[in-house]
Amino acid sequence: MNKLRANIDQWLEGLDKNWEAMPIKRQHQVILYFFAAYVLLTVVVIFNVCRDTVYERNNMALEHIESPASSEEESPASLQDSLKPIKKK
């Protein structure tokens, strides 16, 4: 685990050195490109959400919840017995 952490730290230090060695104008361009990609991705996601909510094909089926006690595997007598408190003598 320590070796993995050391490798990651070394990799991050290398990235930091490359970033510092880059001219300021190029740093600004890279930041602008990342911001433009972020804005584009955000617009695409918002468009897809709006498009999906406009169409009525995404209907959710609403049904009543069936009680598990109504299953015929167990008898009602055994269910009633399990609900009675156990008294110690």
Image: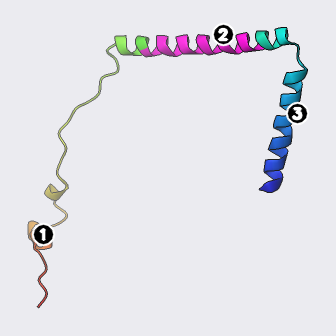
**SS type, badge 1:** helix
The overriding secondary structure of the stretch rendered in magenta is: helix
Instruction: Check disc 2 and give the amino acid type.
Output: Ala
Q: Earlier in the sequence, mark 1 or mark 3?
A: 3
Residue 24 on the magenta span:
no
> Answer yes or no: do the residues labelled 2 and 3 have beta carbons within 8 Å?
no
Quadrant containing the N terminus is: bottom right
- Please indicate whether residue 12 sits to the left or right of residue 75 in the image: right
Viewer-nearest residue: 61 or 27? 27
Question: Magenta segment, which residues?
Answer: 30-49
| Residue 15 picture location, percent across and down | 84, 30
Q: Which residue is mark 2?
A: 36
Residue at the image point whose x is 62% and y is 16% from the top = 38
Q: Residues within 10 Å of mark 3 (few under 14, many from 20)?
A: few
Instruction: Check disc 1 and give the amino acid type.
Output: Leu
Viewer-nearest residue: 20 or 85? 20
Q: Which residue is mark 3?
A: 14
Q: Residues within 10 Å of mark 1 (few under 14, many from 20)?
A: few
Q: Which residue is mark 1?
A: 83
